[in-house]
Amino acid sequence: MIKIWTILWIILTVILIAFPIILIIFYLSKRFQKFILMALNKITHINFLKKFKNEVLLKGKRPTVEPSSDQDLSESQGGSQVETIISETVEIDIIQNIIQAPMVDAPAVAAPQEETVYDRESFLKNKKLLEKIVYEALVLRKEGRLDDYEKKLIEGLALDPDDKDLNRFLADYYFSTGNHKKALSLLKKIVELDPKDHKAIRQIGEIYLTSWDFETAELLIEKAIAINPANPKYYISMVELYYNTDRKPDAVQQMEQVVRLRPTNAGYMLTLADLYEEIGDLDNAQRYYFLVLEYEPSNEKAKRKLKELVKE
């Protein structure tokens, strides 16, 4: 009897010791697997962006570049607000194809035909169906059923792949969830439909910014600002870009523009104060920390920073 109890005690002890070890090994293996998958996804994402740029480059190459051609193109498409910031190289072709989307190989348009009653009825029927799909999709989004929201948008695009609203909704969904690979193709489609869609151009720039392709990102974000210079978020993107490329004085200038556009936003003022402090301009740093407290008297960071600057 004692022998049986001893064996049972040993078995129980082994189980109690082995079980936590097994759990730890399982947990660590899951973490390691997740890390590997994230690394592979990052590599895939970067490779996709490179492939995307190369495809655009091949479509947009020109045999020669005349000095005045880019200027004429810029003026004809509203780009005269921004000065050329790099030499006329193949990179210009890349950006122009991404943001202007010329239809070089567009098929010839057939001669207009007389509209039939059937065609009109079919058009109106599809239009009503698309309106219903958009409405149902927005309801699903409001309810937080994002998977169903995505499926509903895809259902609508199956009926009309060129519907800008559906492309916009789905692109925003993928962009906000970090699925940049899917977002990029939809954003490119939006720019093809409307070459002056500054939101889509800026989002493409953000995708390249997150992939550390700063040169492409800078050109795209500058283009978005040229089309719509009143959106502070676009300048924030430039601040991030300049900061990551060690151009802090330029980042300060962009942040000043943000504060001019939103003069009562304490968060923007706080960011500008921090940037001034980083470049050693303590007088302006103090000035903006004081402005922060005018709009947010309880802001602890601004109070702490002012105390530190006064001691110095």
Image (cartoon, rainbow, N blue to C red):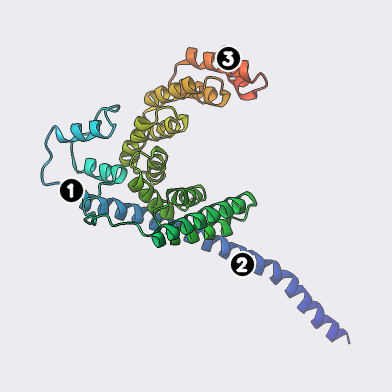
Q: Which residue is drawn at 70% across and 66% down?
A: 20
Viewer-nearest of discs 1 and 3: 1
Q: Residue 37: horizontal and vertical position, in percent? A: 48, 61
Q: Do the residues labelled 2 and 3 touch (CB within 8 Å)?
A: no
Horizontal side of 56 relative to 22 (left or right) equals: left
Q: Residue 26 carries which label?
A: 2
Q: Mark 1 points at which residue?
A: 61
Mark 1 crowdedness (10 Å alpha carbons): few <14, some 14-19, many ≥20: some
**Residue 277 at least partly seen:** no
Of callouts 1 and 3, which one flags the residue occurring earlier in the amino acid sequence?
1
At 89% across and 87% down in the image, what residue appears?
A: 1
Compared with 146, 29 (above or below) is below
Q: In this view, does 8 lie to the left or right of 83?
A: right
Q: How far apart are marks 2 and 3 (CA)?
A: 53 Å
In the rendered structure, find residue 290 and report the number of the disc placed on it.
3
User: Does 24 sit left or right of 157 as displayed?
Assistant: right
